[in-house]
Amino acid sequence: MWYHLLPYIEQKAIFDQGTPANPFVSSDGYKFKTAVLEVAPNIVKAFLCPADGTHGAHLADPSENGAQGAVTTPQGVQLKYSTGSYVGNVMVFDPSIPRTILTGMTDGSSNTAVIGHRLERCDPRTVWGVTFDVYNYMFAEPRNFSPYRPIAVFGMPTYAATYGTVSTSCTGAAMSTPGSNPTPRNCNGVRNQNQDFVSGGLPFQIKPRPGLCQPFVMATSHEVMLVGLGDASVRSVSSSVSAATWKNAWTPADGNPLGNDW
């Protein structure tokens, strides 16, 4: 989704590098890959929160998330991925089932959260007992990423529980057979990763201390969580919000009203 916003925020030159007109898009074997070597390392200021000081470089390699080795294209170029401070709601920004604003958010656009905060660099070392951080990649090939390497969409567990999986790409081409890849995914290949709207009863984190960041939920550097709604408004959400209300706000067509704590 962030890639497709580029022409609307005066970044069409970067966008054009990820279109089929660029021979790298098809030559590296990933038909829908937007994280081509020209696109992936571009730092876009609009996707960075000034209050998020967790990763000043704004670039990371997948190996820095604990992966086995770096990602190298067939052209022999090692990819660096730009990081960002926001995530999109995969229940809304999902091409598997195209919808209009009205049909995609039947609970009401003013009652549906579509964009939220997640730190560029999440340090979970105390929580997990691991030695690596987790980075929030903005331009990434989703099929290359494990449940511990976030990309800039959120809510795949809820998506999978609601819609299940698909067997074809967004253009109707067959993807891998269920036997070779049984993990639920949408038509862009985004798999059922662990990052969800609620994890273990926790809706999100406010300024998590070093070592205590939970990568499976959203996190913000502000005193409150800031979210963008479907009607283009922005609102703050207190840390006292219940997990149920928070999840209902991110589920655009569940028919559940938001609680008084919203």
Image (spheres, rainbow, N blue to C red):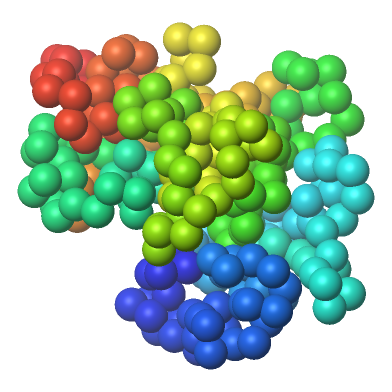
Residue at left offset 45%, top offset 10% = 201
Residue at left offset 25%, top offset 23% = 248
Left or right of residue 107, residue 127 in this image: right
Residue at left offset 36%, top offset 14% = 243
Q: Quadrant of the N terminus?
A: bottom left
- Residue 198: % across, % down: 44, 20
Q: Is residue 214 placed above or below 152 in the rendered structure?
A: above
Q: Is residue 150 placed above or below 246 in the rendered structure?
A: below
Left or right of residue 200, residue 30 in this image: right
Residue 128, quarter of the rendered image: top right
Q: Closer to the camera, 62 or 42? A: 62
- Residue 124: % across, % down: 73, 27
Give the residue at the far top of this rendering: 201
Q: Is residue 26 placed above or below 34 in the rendered structure?
A: below
- Residue 172: % across, % down: 40, 59
Residue at left offset 84%, top offset 65% = 72
Q: Closer to the camera, 232 or 159? A: 159
Count of numbered tags: 0
Q: Quadrant of the C terminus?
A: top left
Q: Closer to the camera, 26 or 207? A: 26
- Residue 13 shows in the view: yes
- Residue 159: % across, % down: 38, 32
Left or right of residue 208, residue 171 in this image: left
- Residue 85 shows in the view: no
